[in-house]
Image: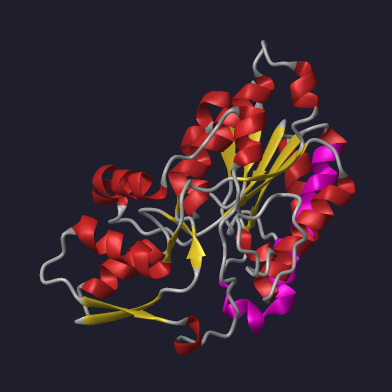
């Protein structure tokens, strides 16, 4: 049976991947208590003990603002660990699926970012994630780097759950309205990852196409909105009464330790072209999450 090593099992995407990857093989899912990605020797030992056919790495240092004061730890987890996983995957002739972020771009482009656009991260988190991408590419081998953005879900720590909590505590919510991106449901990321791997391992797979499959892809919901627009849809769909007043603010009115890109919209055209896959519209996915997932799973909040 095919063995799949999954890191970050308690995170938003990791939780979904435990379920979506199950039909593809035996999933060995590890949390941070079982695999410390800041420990290079521990990474090598764990991979060699498990000897997987596929390594899927959604684990990351994700506290964007705290990374500004913990750059060494963020770099160890986001920048160095992916390279170690890539080296071990290459030694096993295994596939590596690694996740990255819209924050590798500066956000100054007016159109959606392509995979071929030059990265220019503006904060420590983005710089460490870019370092991880570069480490994976330097090793080569069979790898997929999937960049996503504005990830949310019924578990973990994310913008949707924060808005739902604050809506019950405050009469007014001030939300940034000049940063634009594509809110992406963690379940969509998990499902599309599984579908990509299913195509790669399908007996009928076009071997020439699969030969060209390794590389970087953008994997986000379709369409875009601002954080303010995202918040407005969350509150509308939740039907919270009385609903707090939403106040749009500019980024300059809401300073944070880490600078955010103004435009986080990523083009998904390459994903559609190579694999024929798309994550669906952001607002439709949000509705599905809130209607079918949130009420079932939100009582247990895993650490993202």
Which corner quadrant of the image does residue 134 belong to?
A: bottom right
Instruction: Kindly identify the residue that appears in the image at 70 percent across and 62 percent down.
Output: 129
Pick the residue in front: 220 or 53: 220
Instruction: Kindly identify the residue that appears in the image at 72 percent across and 30 percent down.
Output: 53
Does residue 15 appear left or right of residue 57 in this picture?
left
Secondary structure mostly taken by the magenta-highlighted segment of the chain: helix
Q: Is residue 222 above or below residue 106?
A: above
Magenta segment includes 79:
yes
Q: Residue 150: image x %, image y %?
A: 49, 60
Q: Magenta residues?
A: 63-90
Q: Residue 77: image x %, image y %?
A: 70, 64
Colour pattern of the rendering: secondary structure
Q: Is residue 109 above or below residue 2?
A: below
Q: Is residue 103 above or below residue 278?
A: below
Q: Residue 208: image x %, image y %?
A: 80, 19
Q: Is residue 9 visible?
A: yes
Quadrant placement of the N terminus: top right
Number of numbered callouts drawn: 0
């Amino acid at each position: 049976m095919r063995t799949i090593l999954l890191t970050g099992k308690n995170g938003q995407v990791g939780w979904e991947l435990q379920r979506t990857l199950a039909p593809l093989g035996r999933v060995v899912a590890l949390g941070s208590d079982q695999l410390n990605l800041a420990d290079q020797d521990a990474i090598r030992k764990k991979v060699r003990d498990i000897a997987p056919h596929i390594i899927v790495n959604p684990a990351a240092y994700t506290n964007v603002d705290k990374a500004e004061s913990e750059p060494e730890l963020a770099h160890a987890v986001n920048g160095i660990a992916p390279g170690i996983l890539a080296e071990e995957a290459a030694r096993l002739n295994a596939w590596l699926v690694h996740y990255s972020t819209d924050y590798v771009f500066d956000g100054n482009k007016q159109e959606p970012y392509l995979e071929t656009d030059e990265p220019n991260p503006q904060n420590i988190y983005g710089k460490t994630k870019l370092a991880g991408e570069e480490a994976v590419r330097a090793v080569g081998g069979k790898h997929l780097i999937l960049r996503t953005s504005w990830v949310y879900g019924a578990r973990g720590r994310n913008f949707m759950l924060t808005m739902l909590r604050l809506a019950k505590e405050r009469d007014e919510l001030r939300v940034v309205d000049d940063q634009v991106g594509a809110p992406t449901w963690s379940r969509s990321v998990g499902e599309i990852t599984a579908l990509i791997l299913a195509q790669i391992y399908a007996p009928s797979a076009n071997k020439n196409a699969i030969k060209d499959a390794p590389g970087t892809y953008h994997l986000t919901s379709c369409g875009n909105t601002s954080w303010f627009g995202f918040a407005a849809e969350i509150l509308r769909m939740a039907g919270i009464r009385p609903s707090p007043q939403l106040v749009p603010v500019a980024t300059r009115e809401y300073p944070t330790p880490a600078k955010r890109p103004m435009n986080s919209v990523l083009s998904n055209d390459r994903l559609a072209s190579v694999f024929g896959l798309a994550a669906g519209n952001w607002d439709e996915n949000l509705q599905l999450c809130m209607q079918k997932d949130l009420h079932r799973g939100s009582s247990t909040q895993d650490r993202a």
